[in-house]
Amino acid sequence: MHTFLPIAYFRNQFVPFAEANISIATHALHYGTGAFGGLRGIPDPNNPQQILLFRLDRHCQRLSNSARFLQYDLPADKIEYIITDFIKQNKPTSSFYIRPFVYTSDLGIAPRLHKIEKDFFVYGLELGDYLSPEGVTCRISSWHRQEDRSLPLRGKISGAYITSSLAKTEAVEAGFDEAILLNSQGKVCEASGMNIFVVRDGQLITPGYDQDILEGITRASIITLAKELGIEVVERPVDKTELLIADEVFLSGTAAKITPIKRIENYTLPQAKPLTNQLRDKLTAITENRDEGYKDWVYTVALDG
């Protein structure tokens, strides 16, 4: 069971979460014409009256871009202002997750984006570890990632997540924790809601944007950190067989953070994960505002302000 934050932003005002309801006739519910974001917040370990948000500006800009695919003009600075106010309204005391969502809010039928009302809401829930920090097992999914020529994959479009849902359930019901999807060319793409990294011979390898991946904010952050640490980063197509003989493989995302993979199908990966742990320690220090070099990646919300 989820524990939701008590206040939501809904129809241009803050209301109790239980009262933020939509009609069963809502257009987006039928056609997947929505787009969402997701970001974590944590109380500042040194000051519980402050909330730390990782790369708020990037998350707001990506959601604003996603809204444009729905022909909805929602400026990033407006999203940032509402999320900041949302946190002040809720005053969370533990780690939590924020879900901002844009959608076609009209009632009725007919799939379209023109001449239809759009709206925006925000809610949140308490969230600890989404995946086990000790590592997960993965199955290569029988479902393939969509192509950008069919869906705007650079946006987090809600309708696109049917594939993620199918892949995740297939994996879990087969006894695994997570699914790895290939793209239409048979190359490694991403997990059900995470990007993927492979370590081989000291190189950090990850599928590039041309492989139909989501433009992950945590992914981009890891690439920046790896280069600063002197790790060679290569963005290129990745074959399935490379996963099975890799030195390390890990997943990345806002919810997953950095999660190592222990086993893929029936192939057990090496237990030692020095590069994964090095990057995870660095990212954790930044998100907790303990790294002086990346203070600009952390946005602070004062609850008593």
Image: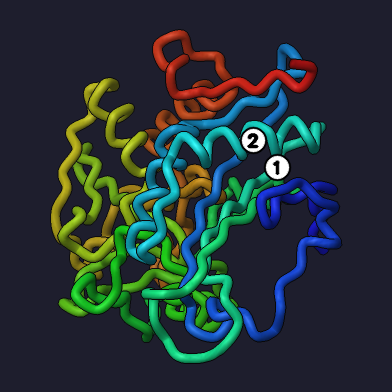
Q: Residue placed at 56% from the left, 68% from the top?
A: 177
The C terminus, quarter of image: top right
- Residue 18 is left or right of residue 167, and the answer is right
Q: State whether residue 173 appears in this view.
A: no
Question: Mark 1 and mark 2 in contact (Cβ < 8 Å)?
Answer: yes
- Element under disc 1: strand
Q: Position of residue 79 (x, y in %)?
A: 52, 41
- Residue 177 is left or right of residue 206, and the answer is right
Q: Which of 62 and 188 is in front in this view?
A: 62
34 in relation to 269, above or below: below
Q: How crowded is mark 2: few (under 14 residues within 10 Å), some or many (20 or more)?
A: many
Q: How crowded is mark 1: few (under 14 residues within 10 Å), some or many (20 or more)?
A: many
- Decide which of tag 2 and tag 1 comes sooner along the chain: 2
Q: Where is residue 88 in the image (x, y as percent from the top left)?
A: 75, 30
Q: Residue placed at 47% from the left, 74% from the top?
A: 116
The disc at residue 96 is: 1
The disc at residue 295 is: none
Extreme-top residue of the structure: 292
Extreme-front residue of the structure: 115
Q: Which of 187 and 267 is in front in this view?
A: 187
Q: Position of residue 195 (x, y in %)?
A: 37, 55
- Element under disc 2: strand
The disc at residue 41 is: 2
